[in-house]
Amino acid sequence: MAIAKRPSRISLPSKNEQWNSLLEYLSEKFPHISEAIWIARFNDGKMHWLEGEVVDLSTPFIANKTLCYYREVEQEPSIPFQHLVLFQNEH
């Protein structure tokens, strides 16, 4: 499994639409990602506020906060040829 080196960020809406937890919000916002995957990310410490504080399954939805999480890919597609680096810098 491949995991992103940098977190993805999501800005939570300014209005709470009756979400009691981050899990409820994320499950509704990203219906193509199973709740089990979100739960695993919470349990593995792969989710935190922008300021660095780790969140867990009991963390409530907080309007206007920025949530960071690490995306994972179960299986990367294989490239059928050797790649050539055209440009590289510190990023």
Image (cartoon, rainbow, N blue to C red):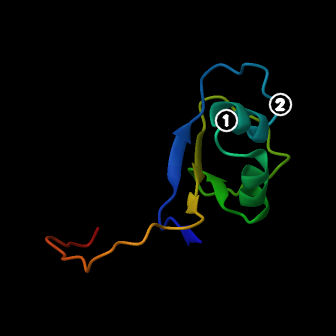
- Please tell me whether mark 2 sits on a helix, a strand or a loop: loop
Tell me residue 58's x, y (percent). 85, 46
Say what amino acid the circle numbered 2 marks.
Asn
Q: Quadrant of residue 67?
A: top right
Instruction: Single out the residue that lies furthest toward the bottom.
Output: 82
Residue 73 shown left or right of residue 87 in the figure: right
Instruction: Single out the residue that lies furthest toward the right.
Output: 58
Report the residue marked by disc 1.
31
Packing grade of label 2 (10 A; few <14, some 14-19, many >=20) is some
Tell me residue 13's x, y (percent). 60, 26
Say what amino acid the circle numbered 1 marks.
Pro
Instruction: Assess whether mark 1 and mark 2 are in contact (beta carbons under 8 angstroms).
Output: no
Q: Is residue 37 above or below residue 61?
A: below
- Identified at 35% across, 72% down, the residue is 79
- Depth check: give the residue in front, 50 or 88: 88
Report the residue marked by disc 2.
20
Tell me residue 37's x, y (percent). 73, 54
- Depth check: give the residue in front, 76 or 12: 76
Q: Quadrant of residue 85?
A: bottom left
